Amino acid sequence: MRTWRIAPPSGDSALLILLQGDLTLSPVQAIMNAANPALSGGGGVDGAIQRAAGPELLRAGRAHVRKHGLVATGQAVLTPGFDLSQPYVIHTVGPVWRGGNAGEGDLLQSAYTNCLTLAQAHDIQTLAFPAISCGAYGFPQELAAPLALAALHAGLARGMVREVHMYLRGDAAYELWLQTAETILRPHT
């Protein structure tokens, strides 16, 4: 686990923490779900969150889609956490990797930024993220890491939230994100 202190305009330091572990057990107010546009559940992070939250989370997602339509790539939606220890889940739809020429980078940054914006609007100060789009959606970790970390750093520096935990799966992913963070965010605490 590595931690970076980021000084927002308010003067209070914000934290960005990179770690490995189970996102659903994170001691935060909201966890981010790397969701599909229909909020219909799936595998990977989405499946783990759905299992931990119980069937009400899937019902809430379906109800949102019935009322508002599919969630656009890069957008974010808030639901209760139901059986999770976190009060909220913020669902975001990351881009499917199509080779890098379909605006995937901008859409990925939008997904992170829109999660922060939604959290700020609901006074949620502590968040946990997975590596959005880096699983089944195929976004290369080495390209996703600098985009995600830049978006998270910008949000923390603007005082949008107080603390972000970034959960990485596997040693290789953790090391890659750690090296990227040390380049972008140095120094760490």
Image (tube, helix red, strand yellow):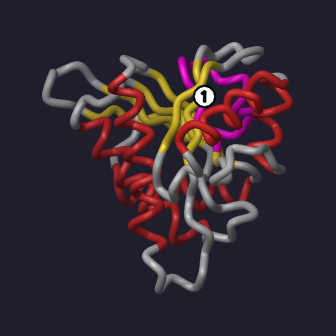
Is residue 118 positioned above or below 40 on the image? above
State left or right for residue 106 relative to residue 134.
left
What's the residue at 42%, 26% (across, down)? 163
Classify mark 1: helix, strand or loop: strand
What's the residue at 68%, 27% (across, down)? 60
Does residue 61 appear in the picture of this structure? yes
- Camera-nearest residue between 19 and 158: 158
**Residue 91 in which image quadrant:** top right
Does residue 1 appear in the picture of this structure? no
Percent position of residue 109, x then y: 41, 58
Label tally: 1
What's the residue at 86%, 30% (across, down)? 51
Mark 1 — residue?
89
Q: Magenta span covers which residues?
A: 19-33
Percent position of residue 48, x then y: 81, 37
**Quadrant containing the C terminus in the rendered view:** top left
Percent position of residue 187, x then y: 34, 45
Is residue 152 positioned above or below 3 on the image? below
Q: Does the magenta segment cover residue 24?
A: yes
Percent position of residue 67, x then y: 57, 36
The amino acid marked with disc number 1 is Val
What's the residue at 37%, 47% (across, down)? 113
Q: Residues within 10 Å of mark 1 (few under 14, many from 20)?
A: many
**Quadrant containing the N terminus in the rendered view:** top right
Is residue 101 positioned above or below 142 on the image? below
Q: Does the magenta segment cover residue 13?
A: no
State left or right for residue 153 relative to residue 20.
left
State left or right for residue 113 relative to residue 143.
left
- Camera-nearest residue between 64 and 119: 64
**Residue 8 in which image quadrant:** top left
